[in-house]
Amino acid sequence: GARRRHSATFGSMEHGSAVLVALVAAGCLLLGACSGDDAVVEALRQAGAQSSRPLSVRSAALEEVQRPKGQVDLYAGRSDLAVAASRRDVQLLKTLLAKGPADRAQKTAALLAAVEAGSFDAVGILLAAGADPAGRDARGRGAPGIALQAGDARILALLLAAGVDAGSNGNSGAPLLVEATRARDVGSVEVLLQRGAAINAVDANGESSLMISAAQEESGLLELLLARRADV
């Protein structure tokens, strides 16, 4: 009857409180980030949650409550830092960097996640924190190549300013300039040329950016490359 329902409700509340306490104790600031509940994140921050455990491993408590049973974990194998970057949660990212130990490899993995998410602010924060702008993920993808694939010239410029060689190869193995040309990305081509990319660089088939833009009949890119004295 009513007493049984009251007991069940109280038990549920008690369980929920125990979970929250466990999360605070574990320093799991990512509960709200993964669930999309900003109020929970703020509550954890207000409670003084700390990320004292290694940022390369997420807590068991988080794994249990972050999603309904049967739902695929989109963040499997990622650190708290990388999840925050993927979700473009700049405030949480700053909190984790300030409170938790993270080596350069962890910061670099988070940087790659931020680039893939298209978060300009998160990329800047992680570069300032010491992430490697030339680092690559387990699939061999680098941040500049990911930015090119997304057509994000702003993030590409940020990575180049942080030390990435404009003449390096992208994720296809071709020079970044050739990749940008194939993508018809005028903004990224301009950024790469400004940072010193070799205008006559070729891919494995011997095709230069000028040859590719001519075949694509991209007049804007052709004019840009010819103005920069690309070999005809």
Image: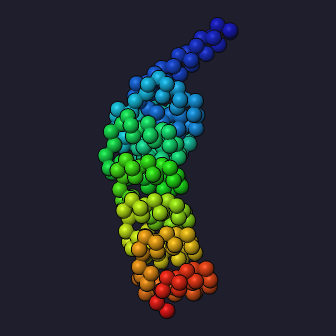
Res 206 → quadrant = bottom left
Outermost top residue: 3
Name, please, the residue furthest toward the right: 1
Instruction: Describe residue 56's horizontal placement relative to residue 23 as left or right.
Output: left
Residue occupying the point 55% across, 65% down: 151
Residue 138 appears in the rendering: no
Q: Nearer the viewer, residue 111 or 199?
A: 199
What residue is shown at x 56% (from left), y 17% (from top)? 13
Residue 93 lies, in percent from the top left, at 46, 41
Residue in the image at 46% along x and 33% along y: 29
Side of 183 where 57 appears, left or right: left
Image vertical order of residue 55 relative to residue 41, above or below: below
Question: x%, y% of residue 137?
Answer: 39, 58
Residue 25 point in image, percent of width and height? 40, 24
Residue at the bottom extreme of this rendering:
232
Write the residue at 53% across / 84% down.
227
Q: Is residue 90 visible?
A: yes
Residue nearest the viewer, comparing 210 with 76: 210
Vertical position of residue 96 compared to residue 149: above or below: above
